[in-house]
Image (cartoon, helix red, strand yellow):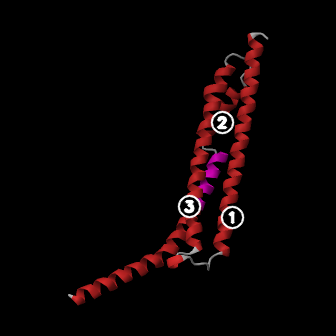
Protein backbone atom coordinates (compact mmCIF):
# COMPACT_ATOMS: atom_id res chain seq x y z
CA UNK A 1 0.00 0.00 0.00
CA UNK A 2 1.53 3.30 -1.03
CA UNK A 3 1.38 6.57 0.94
CA UNK A 4 -1.50 8.07 -1.10
CA UNK A 5 -3.64 4.98 -0.61
CA UNK A 6 -2.90 5.01 3.10
CA UNK A 7 -3.91 8.68 3.37
CA UNK A 8 -7.11 7.99 1.42
CA UNK A 9 -8.00 5.02 3.66
CA UNK A 10 -7.38 7.06 6.81
CA UNK A 11 -9.51 9.85 5.36
CA UNK A 12 -12.37 7.46 4.57
CA UNK A 13 -12.15 5.92 8.02
CA UNK A 14 -12.18 9.29 9.77
CA UNK A 15 -15.08 10.56 7.65
CA UNK A 16 -17.09 7.45 8.54
CA UNK A 17 -16.28 7.98 12.22
CA UNK A 18 -17.40 11.63 11.96
CA UNK A 19 -20.71 10.54 10.42
CA UNK A 20 -21.21 8.04 13.26
CA UNK A 21 -20.52 10.85 15.71
CA UNK A 22 -23.16 13.04 14.05
CA UNK A 23 -25.63 10.12 14.20
CA UNK A 24 -24.93 9.79 17.93
CA UNK A 25 -25.62 13.52 18.24
CA UNK A 26 -29.05 13.09 16.61
CA UNK A 27 -29.84 10.11 18.84
CA UNK A 28 -28.84 12.12 21.90
CA UNK A 29 -31.16 14.94 20.82
CA UNK A 30 -33.99 12.43 20.37
CA UNK A 31 -33.35 11.23 23.92
CA UNK A 32 -33.56 14.76 25.35
CA UNK A 33 -36.71 15.60 23.40
CA UNK A 34 -38.32 12.36 24.57
CA UNK A 35 -37.26 13.03 28.18
CA UNK A 36 -38.77 16.52 28.08
CA UNK A 37 -41.99 15.18 26.54
CA UNK A 38 -42.23 12.50 29.25
CA UNK A 39 -41.60 15.09 31.98
CA UNK A 40 -44.38 17.29 30.59
CA UNK A 41 -46.72 14.29 30.61
CA UNK A 42 -45.64 13.51 34.16
CA UNK A 43 -46.46 17.12 35.15
CA UNK A 44 -49.91 16.75 33.66
CA UNK A 45 -50.77 13.35 35.14
CA UNK A 46 -49.30 13.86 38.62
CA UNK A 47 -50.51 17.38 39.28
CA UNK A 48 -52.42 16.33 42.43
CA UNK A 49 -49.73 14.10 43.95
CA UNK A 50 -48.18 15.54 47.13
CA UNK A 51 -45.06 14.21 48.85
CA UNK A 52 -43.85 15.07 52.32
CA UNK A 53 -44.26 18.57 53.66
CA UNK A 54 -46.44 19.75 50.78
CA UNK A 55 -43.80 19.15 48.10
CA UNK A 56 -45.70 18.23 44.97
CA UNK A 57 -44.76 15.82 42.21
CA UNK A 58 -45.16 18.79 39.87
CA UNK A 59 -42.30 20.59 41.62
CA UNK A 60 -40.08 17.50 41.50
CA UNK A 61 -40.72 16.92 37.78
CA UNK A 62 -40.25 20.63 37.05
CA UNK A 63 -36.84 20.57 38.75
CA UNK A 64 -35.93 17.50 36.68
CA UNK A 65 -37.17 19.35 33.59
CA UNK A 66 -34.94 22.36 34.24
CA UNK A 67 -32.00 20.01 34.79
CA UNK A 68 -32.65 17.99 31.64
CA UNK A 69 -33.03 21.18 29.59
CA UNK A 70 -29.75 22.57 30.92
CA UNK A 71 -27.98 19.28 30.18
CA UNK A 72 -29.42 19.29 26.67
CA UNK A 73 -28.16 22.85 26.06
CA UNK A 74 -24.66 21.87 27.25
CA UNK A 75 -24.76 18.71 25.16
CA UNK A 76 -25.65 20.64 21.99
CA UNK A 77 -22.71 22.99 22.65
CA UNK A 78 -20.32 20.09 23.24
CA UNK A 79 -21.33 18.23 20.10
CA UNK A 80 -21.13 21.42 18.02
CA UNK A 81 -17.63 22.14 19.28
CA UNK A 82 -16.45 18.60 18.62
CA UNK A 83 -18.02 18.50 15.15
CA UNK A 84 -16.37 21.83 14.25
CA UNK A 85 -13.02 20.49 15.43
CA UNK A 86 -13.48 17.33 13.40
CA UNK A 87 -14.23 19.43 10.31
CA UNK A 88 -11.82 22.30 10.61
CA UNK A 89 -8.92 20.78 12.49
CA UNK A 90 -8.74 17.22 11.27
CA UNK A 91 -10.59 16.63 8.01
CA UNK A 92 -9.45 19.87 6.40
CA UNK A 93 -5.82 19.07 7.25
CA UNK A 94 -6.22 15.57 5.84
CA UNK A 95 -7.77 17.02 2.68
CA UNK A 96 -4.66 19.13 2.07
CA UNK A 97 -3.03 15.88 0.97
CA UNK A 98 -5.89 14.97 -1.39
CA UNK A 99 -6.66 16.33 -4.87
CA UNK A 100 -10.30 17.17 -3.94
CA UNK A 101 -11.43 18.85 -0.70
CA UNK A 102 -15.20 18.26 -0.31
CA UNK A 103 -15.43 18.78 3.45
CA UNK A 104 -13.29 21.92 3.32
CA UNK A 105 -15.64 23.33 0.68
CA UNK A 106 -18.68 22.23 2.67
CA UNK A 107 -17.39 23.81 5.87
CA UNK A 108 -16.63 27.06 4.01
CA UNK A 109 -20.24 27.05 2.76
CA UNK A 110 -21.55 26.49 6.27
CA UNK A 111 -19.38 29.31 7.62
CA UNK A 112 -20.71 31.61 4.88
CA UNK A 113 -24.30 30.67 5.77
CA UNK A 114 -23.64 31.49 9.40
CA UNK A 115 -22.47 34.97 8.41
CA UNK A 116 -25.88 35.54 6.80
CA UNK A 117 -27.59 34.63 10.11
CA UNK A 118 -29.22 31.48 8.78
CA UNK A 119 -30.57 29.34 11.61
CA UNK A 120 -28.81 26.05 11.93
CA UNK A 121 -30.32 22.90 13.41
CA UNK A 122 -28.27 23.38 16.57
CA UNK A 123 -29.79 26.85 17.01
CA UNK A 124 -33.26 25.33 16.89
CA UNK A 125 -32.22 22.69 19.42
CA UNK A 126 -30.94 25.39 21.76
CA UNK A 127 -34.16 27.40 21.38
CA UNK A 128 -36.23 24.32 22.26
CA UNK A 129 -33.98 23.55 25.24
CA UNK A 130 -34.21 27.15 26.47
CA UNK A 131 -37.99 27.24 26.02
CA UNK A 132 -38.34 23.96 27.92
CA UNK A 133 -36.09 25.27 30.70
CA UNK A 134 -38.16 28.45 30.99
CA UNK A 135 -41.39 26.45 31.05
CA UNK A 136 -40.13 24.12 33.79
CA UNK A 137 -38.67 27.09 35.71
CA UNK A 138 -42.05 28.85 35.60
CA UNK A 139 -43.70 25.69 36.94
CA UNK A 140 -41.09 25.57 39.74
CA UNK A 141 -41.79 29.19 40.69
CA UNK A 142 -45.53 28.52 40.61
CA UNK A 143 -45.12 25.52 42.92
CA UNK A 144 -42.60 27.16 45.25
CA UNK A 145 -44.46 30.44 45.78
CA UNK A 146 -47.16 28.99 48.11
CA UNK A 147 -44.53 27.00 50.03
CA UNK A 148 -42.37 30.07 50.56
CA UNK A 149 -45.41 32.15 51.54
CA UNK A 150 -46.47 29.51 54.08
CA UNK A 151 -42.93 29.37 55.50
CA UNK A 152 -42.85 33.17 55.74
CA UNK A 153 -46.21 33.18 57.57
CA UNK A 154 -44.94 30.56 60.03
CA UNK A 155 -41.81 32.61 60.68
CA UNK A 156 -43.83 35.79 61.23
CA UNK A 157 -46.19 33.90 63.57
CA UNK A 158 -43.24 32.47 65.49
CA UNK A 159 -41.61 35.88 65.80
CA UNK A 160 -44.86 37.47 66.99
CA UNK A 161 -45.28 34.72 69.65
CA UNK A 162 -41.66 35.12 70.67
CA UNK A 163 -41.96 38.92 70.88
CA UNK A 164 -45.23 38.75 72.85
CA UNK A 165 -43.72 36.21 75.25
CA UNK A 166 -40.89 38.53 76.29
Q: Mark 3 to mark 2: distance in Å?
A: 31 Å
Magenta: predominant secondary structure element? helix
Mark 2 or mark 1: name the one nearer the start of the chain.
1
Q: Position of residue 135 (x, y in %)?
A: 58, 65
Q: Is residue 77 magenta?
A: no
Using the rendered view, name the quadrant where residue 155 is placed: bottom left
Q: Residues within 10 Å of mark 1 (few under 14, many from 20)?
A: some
User: Label 1 belongs to which residue?
Assistant: 38
In front of the other: label 3 or label 2? 3
Q: Mark 3 to mark 1: distance in Å?
A: 13 Å
Establish if 79 lies above or below 63. above
Q: Residue furthest right?
A: 1
Using the rendered view, name the quadrant where residue 88 is placed: top right
Residue at 64%, 51% in the rendered image: 125
Q: Nearer the viewer, residue 22 or 96?
A: 22
Residue at 56%, 54% in the rendered image: 70
Q: If the image is split into quadrants, where does the N terminus sit?
A: top right
Q: Residue furthest left?
A: 166
Q: Residues within 10 Å of mark 3 (few under 14, many from 20)?
A: many
User: Label 2 belongs to which residue?
Assistant: 110
Using the rendered view, name the quadrant where residue 15 is placed: top right
Residue at 70%, 28% in the rendered image: 103
User: Label 3 belongs to which residue?
Assistant: 66
| The magenta segment | 120-132
Q: Position of residue 12 (x, y in %)?
A: 76, 25
Give left or right: position of 35 versus 8.
left
Looking at the rendered structure, the secondary structure element under dot 3 is helix
Amino acid sequence: MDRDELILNEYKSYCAQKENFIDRNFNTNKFYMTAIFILILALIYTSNVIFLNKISATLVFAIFGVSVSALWWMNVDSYNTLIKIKYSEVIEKMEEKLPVKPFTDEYAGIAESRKNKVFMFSDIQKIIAAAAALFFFAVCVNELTPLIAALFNKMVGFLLKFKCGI
